[in-house]
Amino acid sequence: MRIDNYKGHALHKKYVADLICYGKIVAELKVLESLGRREEAQLINYMKATHKPVGLLINFGSSPRLEWRRYVI
């Protein structure tokens, strides 16, 4: 899904989601030691921009297992 306009403002860059699941869920994939507020804010902004109420933040870089968070707005 591409967003060219957000809240009436033209964007200079196009956003392309990592995954859109079932046409309803924005999934953002990361490979980091741990997830932080920055990644959370990024996902919430993407959810607002795409008008999708559910988001998944998935981190494949945390050890020893997968780290994930679900957000609903």
Image (cartoon, helix red, strand yellow):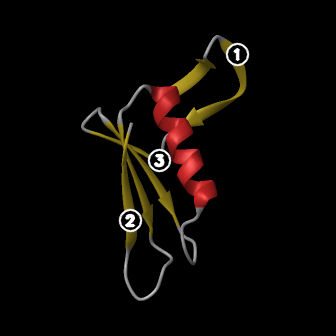
Amino acid beneath label 3: Asp
Which label number is shown at residue 68? 2
Residue 9 drawn above or below residue 15? above
Confirm or deny contact between disc 3 and disc 2 (CB under 8 A).
Answer: no
Mark 1 residue crowding within 10 angstroms, few (<14) / some (14–19) / many (20+): few
Q: Which residue is mark 3?
A: 18
Q: Position of residue 63 (x, y in %)?
A: 46, 86
Residue 19 is situated, as x and y percent measured from the top left of the image, at: 40, 45
Mark 3 neighbour class, 10 Å CA radius: few under 14, some 14 to 19, many 20 or more: few
Q: Secondary structure at mark 1?
A: strand
Disc 2 secondary structure class: strand
Q: In the rendered image, which residue does mark 1 sit on? A: 10
Q: Say what amino acid the circle numbered 1 marks.
A: Ala
Q: Nearer the viewer, mark 3 or mark 1?
A: 1
Q: Nearer the viewer, mark 1 or mark 2?
A: 2
Going from N to C along the chain, the mark reached first, 1 or 2, is: 1
In this rendering, the answer to whether 5 lies above or below 53 is above
Residue drawn where x is 48% and y is 79% of the image: 62
The tag earlier along the polypeptide, 3 or 1, is: 1
Q: Please, what is the three-letter code of the amino acid marked with disc 2?
A: Trp
Cα distance, mark 3 to mark 2? Answer: 15 Å
As drawn, is 21 to the left or to the right of 40?
left
N-term mark: 3 or 2: 3
x, y percent for residue 67: 40, 72
Q: Is residue 54 left or right of residue 7?
A: left
> What residue is shown at x 54% (from left), y 53% (from top)?
40
Counting every numbered tag in the picture gives 3
